[in-house]
C-alpha cells in the first residue's frame, strides 16, 4: 500500500518569508498524481497545487511551488512571501493510478503552519 | 454551483444510536468517497463509489455502510455508533481520472458519547 509521510508536525515562519513543507511517499507505480491541500480553521479542504508524476517540470501556482523529485519520491511545497492567511494545516496527498482498486487519495498526517506577524 | 454539500455540520450521538450523514454533489462526478479525519492521522478513506450502484471499502470501513442509488447522492450510515467513531467526516467527489482533484464538502463533526 502507498504511504505518504509528512515529517514536520508543525512549522513556523515570519510573515513575508519563505517556508518549505516536506512530503515523501512510497509507491511502486510510475504514473500517479500528487496534491497539496490546505485546511484552514474553517475545516474546508482547499486544493493548493497538483503535480503529474510524468511531468518533469515542477508545478507552480502564484506564491506556491513544488520541488518534485521523482527518484527520491519527494514532493515538497514552497510558500513564498508568506501571508497571515496561509496559516493552516497542509496535507500532502497521493492519488493512485486509475483502476485496480480505490481511486481515492492517500494523505499524509499533515503539517500545521504558523505565520508569525 | 453548490459543489459538494454535506449535512449536518455537527452531530452528537449516544453510543448505540444510528444515523446517516448526507452527501450530495451537483457536478455529475462519477467518483464519490467518504473520509474521516482524526487528530494526527490525516484523512483516511472509509468507503468509495465509482458510479451509481457500485461501492467498495476503503482503509477503515468497519462500522459504516454506504449506498449509491443515484450519481448525486452518497450517504454514510453509522449502524451502531461507538466513541471510536468520534471524528470529522468529509465527503468528496471527482471525475474519474488521476488528474482531477477531489472536491470536498465542508465536513461533519460527529461526537459519540
Image: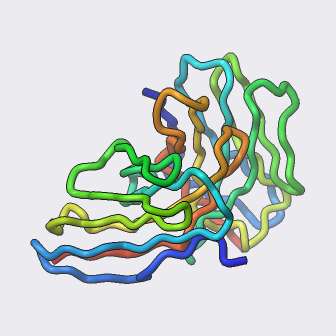
Residue closest to the eye, B56 or B63: B56
User: Going 83% across and 64% down the picture, which residue do you hit?
Assistant: A16
Q: To which quarter of the image does residue A44 belong?
A: bottom right
Foreground residue among A7 and A72: A72
Is residue A43 visible in the rendered image? The answer is: no
Residue at left offset 58%, top offset 43%: A93
- Give the residue drawn at x 42%, y 27%: A1
Q: Is residue A105 visible?
A: yes
Q: Is residue B99 above or below residue B5?
A: above
Residue B20, x across and y down, in percent: 31, 73
> Tag count in the figure?
0
Q: Give coordinates of residue B54: x percent, y percent.
A: 43, 47
| Up-down relation of residue A100 to residue A62 (above or below) | above
Residue at 86% in and 52% down: A61
User: In this rendering, would B113 be left or right of A43?
Assistant: left
The image quadrant where one finds the C terminus of chain B is bottom left
Which corner quadrant of the image does residue B109 belong to? bottom left
The N terminus of chain B - image quarter? bottom right
Q: Nearer the viewer, residue B60 or B72?
A: B72
The residue lying furthest to the left in this view is: B16
Above or below: residue B33 compared with residue B50: below
Q: Is residue B63 above or below residue B81?
A: above
Q: Position of residue A82 (x, y in %)?
A: 79, 62
Amino acid at each position: 500500500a502507498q504511504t505518504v509521510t509528512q515529517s514536520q508536525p508543525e512549522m513556523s515562519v515570519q510573515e513575508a518569508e519563505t517556508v518549505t513543507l516536506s512530503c515523501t511517499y512510497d509507491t511502486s507505480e510510475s504514473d500517479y498524481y500528487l496534491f497539496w491541500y490546505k485546511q484552514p480553521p474553517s475545516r474546508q479542504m482547499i486544493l493548493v497545487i497538483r503535480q503529474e508524476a510524468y511531468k518533469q517540470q515542477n508545478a507552480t501556482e502564484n506564491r506556491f511551488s513544488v520541488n518534485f523529485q521523482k527518484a527520491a519520491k519527494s514532493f515538497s511545497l514552497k510558500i513564498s512571501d508568506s501571508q497571515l492567511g496561509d496559516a493552516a494545516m497542509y496535507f500532502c496527498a497521493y492519488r493512485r493510478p486509475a483502476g485496480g482498486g480505490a481511486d481515492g487519495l492517500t494523505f499524509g498526517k499533515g503539517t500545521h503552519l504558523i505565520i508569525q506577524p | 454551483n453548490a459543489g459538494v454539500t454535506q449535512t449536518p455540520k455537527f452531530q452528537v450521538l449516544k453510543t448505540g444510536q444510528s444515523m446517516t450523514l448526507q452527501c450530495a454533489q451537483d457536478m455529475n462526478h462519477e467518483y464519490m468517497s467518504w473520509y474521516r479525519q482524526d487528530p494526527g492521522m490525516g484523512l483516511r478513506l472509509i468507503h468509495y463509489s465509482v458510479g451509481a450502484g457500485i461501492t467498495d471499502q476503503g482503509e477503515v470501513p468497519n462500522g459504516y455502510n454506504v449506498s449509491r442509488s443515484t450519481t448525486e447522492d452518497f450517504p454514510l450510515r453509522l449502524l451502531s455508533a461507538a466513541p471510536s467513531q468520534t471524528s470529522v467526516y468529509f465527503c468528496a467527489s471527482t471525475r474519474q481520472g488521476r488528474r482531477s482533484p477531489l472536491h470536498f464538502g465542508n465536513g461533519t463533526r460527529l461526537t459519540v458519547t
